Image (cartoon, rainbow, N blue to C red):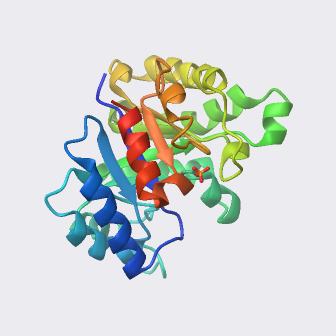
Amino acid sequence: MKRKLIAGNWKMNGSLAANEQLLKAILAGLGQPVCQVAVGVPAIYLSQCQTLLAGSAIELGAQDISAHESGAYTGEISGVMLKEFGVRYVIAGHSERRQYHGETDELVAAKVQRALGCGITPIVCVGETLAEREAGKTDEVVKRQLAAVIHANGHCISEIVVAYEPVWAIGTGKTATPDQAQQVHAVLRAQLKAASANADRIQILYGGSMNAANASALLAQPDINGGLIGGAALKAQDFLTIIAAAA
Ligand code: 13P
């Protein structure tokens, strides 16, 4: 198994001044991290963050990627463009993009394919809504979402990162319990194993109100290999505490 990965997802937050302050504070407290660390920043700040993170142990991530290579796709950003700004990771299929931007399982799978083709590691998000959980459909939903990615990417899926993000836990302060999260992570691991001989080294992150107080218990689960952190990634001390919990 690889080292754990703690990735921040800043979502649509930040400013030139705030980003500089946040990254400088994180870098000042980071030392030599024992886990992998990344921040997923708004595309317009990639250049700024690339400069601020140059030579550091923190890798740069983007929050979305076009499924197209280039051309007449107003507003979209290609994998090749992301690569020019030192992007190592891209979040694909975050529930907010599925929910507010109509991203389907197939589109997410195509974005994953595009990222892999550009040498960018996609962090593929899957997760059920509260209604789906209450209807007993959690496993079915996450397996369907992941199956589309496996189907489109074949053996290359050993190069992806998966993030289990229950929609009901995102930004709500309601975290999945370590047992609830582990159960779903085990389902995802089994699905990955059926598709790839190298599934043991695929990192499966948990995301959804992970914070400085609950990170250790979640990260202690056997199939939780890191975290995708929203709100707590915007506070340097909280993000550093979560990184330390991944030791
Ligand atoms: P919160 O940590 O704010 O719940 O967000 C989680 C998330 O959506 C990360 O991608």
Looking at the image, which residue is at 57% across and 53% down?
A: 94
Q: In this orientation, which residue lies closer to the viewer: 152 or 235?
A: 235
Q: Nearer the viewer, residue 17 or 73?
A: 17
Left or right: 4 in relation to 187: left
Q: Residue furthest left?
A: 55
Quadrant where the image shows the N terminus: top left
Q: 194 and 25: which one is in front?
A: 25
- Residue 125 percent location from the top left of the image: 54, 44
Is residue 96 depicted above or below 212 in this figure? below
Task: Indicate the position of residue 140 as horizontal and vertical percent values.
Answer: 71, 28
x 25%, y 63%: residue: 83
Q: Number of numbered discs present?
A: 0
Q: 42 above or below 98?
A: below
| Image height of 70 relative to 72, above or below | above
Task: Specify the quadrant that holds the C terminus.
Answer: top left
Give the x, y percent position of residue 163: 51, 39
Left or right placement of residue 150 versus residue 1 in this view: right
Left or right of 154: which side holds 82?
left
For residue 210, side relative to residue 120 (left or right): right
- Report whether residue 147 is seen: yes
Q: Is residue 230 visible?
A: no
- Coordinates of residue 41 in the picture (x, y in percent): 41, 65
For the point 51% across and 42% down, the residue is: 212
Q: Residue at x 66, y 40 (%)?
A: 166
